[in-house]
Image (tube, rainbow, N blue to C red):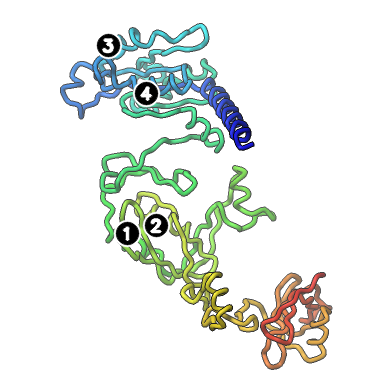
Amino acid sequence: MSELMSALDAVSLAKGREAGRGYFGRLTRSAYAMVLAGGRGSRLKELTDWRCKPAVPFGGKYRIIDFTLSNCVNSGVRRIGVATQYKSYSLLRHLQRGWSFLDGRIGEHVDILPAQQQVAEAWYRGTADAVFQNLNVLRRDGCKYVLVLSGDHVYKMDYGRLLEDHAAREADATLVCVEVPLAEASAFGVVSVDASGRVTAEKPIDDLSESAVDQAMTRFVGTFDQTLPAFSARKLGGVKFYELARRGEEVPETTKEVTVAEFARTGPLADGNLPFRLSCSSGTYARALAHDLGAALGCGGHLAALRRSAIGPFLVEDALPVEEIGRRREAGDSLGAAWLPLDRIPLPFQEVVVDPQQERRLRSGQTVLAQGIAAVPGDWIRLADRRGALVAVGTVSDRVGAGAVVVVQPRIVFRTEPDMVGSVRT
């Protein structure tokens, strides 16, 4: 029986792989690769005296550009354009002699795209301009996706998986990056991404010191208007912001007054990670602070992890794991500060003191009238007896006349023992 199950699993896996290849194939067949091969390669000095950098020999008869072209062909991207400009004779000869095997009859080709001053009286003035000057080629090709690739990078990559991720995210553009140590980042173009992979900034880091970080963090201490992130629970017309963001709809920029009592580094800046401690008012978005701090430093940033250490009077060091609570209960040991009776929980509700008759009604699940409180239907109310003991927690169901009299429906009713609780279904 186990052999049969293994065989079925193997068949299912094989079908899954075949389906994956078919999906990749549809994506790669609708892609056009624009390979930028016009760089001077000045850092290679004498090696580029007579040829451009992509044409520099690598491993005998091969050239640097062969890495990118091989990635394209092995990924199924076989419509390729090579934009040339600087000392291109050696490169053109290599492309004609080494990459002429693609079959043009089925739409496979390597097009040579020299700078032609098609748009203005200027040669290619950079990466974006090289693509812009060849828009007519891309439109004529009818491709759905465009891969903009460098012709002088040495690496191996499956562009099919890149296209799959790009299509799944419905992104406007997707960047491919590698992580480098922070100390080496100033030698590269640098992007900062959040936990989902979304680019939040694209700036070089010249000199990011801990003193600069500390100085920037002090700017966010105090009371100020914080711009809410798109993925927040604030509502617009009854729809939460994060629902709009997930649908790709425009999220209005909204601010909220918050107070930050402390925002300080708790450890060294290492590999782009910064541990910190934050003490703030309710409703403050820690991930928005991380984003704003990265913007203030000029490098971008996102919240990688968050651990709540306290909320109001509750401290994480007083908490106990569930297993420890069970062990102490069996041993008859005290739970210490981890145990808080229900009637001592500081609920953020208005309080109403009830008389004995109202208390009996509440314990029976019946409504009571409350006076002298400013509440509207839906507000939560804490109901206590004359000794301050918690009787019930309810919500305002209606108002009576124009005065400050409301009808309170009990939702959670506490028995005589303060640690017993019941619920009322309405």
Write down the residue under mark 4: 68
Q: Name the amino acid, label 4.
A: Thr
Asked if residue 282 shows in the view, the reply is: yes
Please name the residue shown 53% across and 32% down the image. Answer: 164
Q: CA distance from mark 1 to mark 4?
A: 39 Å
Against 317, residue 72 (above or below) is: above
Task: Say the numbered circle drawn on residue 213.
Answer: 1
Sequence-wise, the earlier of marks 2 and 3 is 3
Task: Say the numbered circle drawn on residue 293.
Answer: 2
Q: Name the amino acid, label 1.
A: Val
Q: CA distance from mark 3 to mark 1?
A: 50 Å
How packed mark 3 is, by other alpha carbons closer than 10 Å (few <14, some 14-19, many 20 or more), is some
- How many numbered marks have been drawn onto this rendered protein structure? 4
**Disc 2 versus disc 4: nearer the observer:** 4
Q: CA distance from mark 2 to mark 3?
A: 49 Å
Q: Please provide percent x and percent y for residue 408.
A: 78, 78
Q: Name the amino acid, label 2.
A: Leu
Looking at the image, do the residues carrying marks 2 and 1 touch, with CB atoms under 8 Å apart? yes
**Residue in the foreground of this view, choosing between 231 and 169:** 169
**Residue in the foreground of this view, choosing between 29 and 118:** 29
Quarter holding residue 391: bottom right
Asked if residue 123 shows in the view, the reply is: no
Write down the residue under mark 3: 89
Against 36, residue 249 (above or below) is: below
Looking at the image, do the residues carrying marks 1 and 4 touch, with CB atoms under 8 Å apart? no
Q: Name the amino acid, label 3.
A: Tyr
